[in-house]
Amino acid sequence: MEPKLTWIEIQDHIGWIKINREKKLNALNRDLINQLHQGLLDFQNDPNVRVIILTGNGDKAFVAGADIAEFSSYTPEQASLLTREGNQVLFDFVANMEKPVIAAINGYALGGGLELAMACHLRIAAEHAKMGLPEVSLGIIPGYGGTQRLPALVGRGRAMEMILSGDMIGAEKAYQWGLVNRVVPGDQLLEAAISMAERMMKNAPQSLKNAIKAINAADGTPKGFENEGILFSSCFGTEEFNEGITAFLEKRKPKF
């Protein structure tokens, strides 16, 4: 069991998680995946946390991929279990968090690292960050949602190019393609993440939760619209709804 992540902390209603495997470029292994899950679960259950920011230690890597040595001898059956457990414990868990999760990409986000960033609801990248899914160069393919989430963010053609070439792209291209929401100088990354978090924390927590659920259900089919309608109507009559409407009518800022 590796040491605990160095920094899991709450500051001003923001839950911070900083991945601490700098010497390994913050590569993901099972212990780290489980520690991230526990930290996120604690924040999910803590009413004092409104938004979560996930980043890596140092300025070289957010997460430079999975720890290849850990699964280099796996059989297909073991690999199947690895991807199912990993998605359940971390990647799908992040995507379905009820509180916004921001990835502050402080360097390389490759393979499982980019898949983790894509599972987050929003992404801010340092100017020097580089992103890619190089799994085909190892004789495998992305297994933590990369083939599903990347096309949804950048489109099928660009996802094909990135995955089939295995090439990295820089932060500016990632922004132009829609892979990240914002690019900032490296020394402004955490400040920019805080600013984004503060914009969200002005809004009703239950509404943020329902909006995340509705967007995650978006698939262009009638079912997606039906889910939106259910989540929309469930907001009415709540304390947050009453405060939001009253504040609007009274021409003041709501207090959620």
Image (cartoon, rainbow, N blue to C red):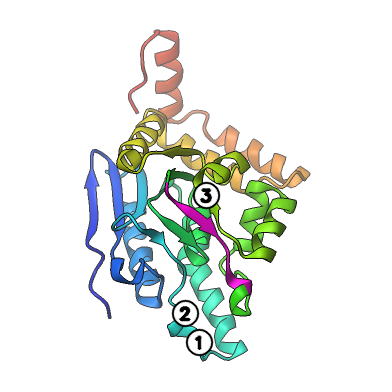
Q: Amino acid at mark 2?
A: Ile
Query: What is the quadrant of the C terminus in the image?
Result: top left
Residue stretch rendered in magenta on the structure: 128-136
Mark 2 lies on a secondary structure that is helix
Considering depth in this image, is 13 or 120 the residue closer to the camera? 120
Image mark for residue 201: none
Q: Amino acid at mark 3?
A: Gly
- Give x and y (percent) for residue 100: 43, 44
Q: CA distance from mark 3 to mark 1?
A: 28 Å
Residue located 69% across and 52% down the image: 158
* Residue 140 falls within the magenta-colored stretch: no
Image mark for residue 68: 2
In the displayed structure image, the side of residue 41 where residue 118 appears, left or right? right
Q: Quadrant of residue 61?
A: bottom left
- Give x and y (percent) for residue 91: 50, 62
Considering depth in this image, is 248 or 186 the residue closer to the camera? 186
State yes or no: discs 1 and 2 in contact (Cβ < 8 Å).
yes
Q: CA distance from mark 3 to mark 2?
A: 23 Å
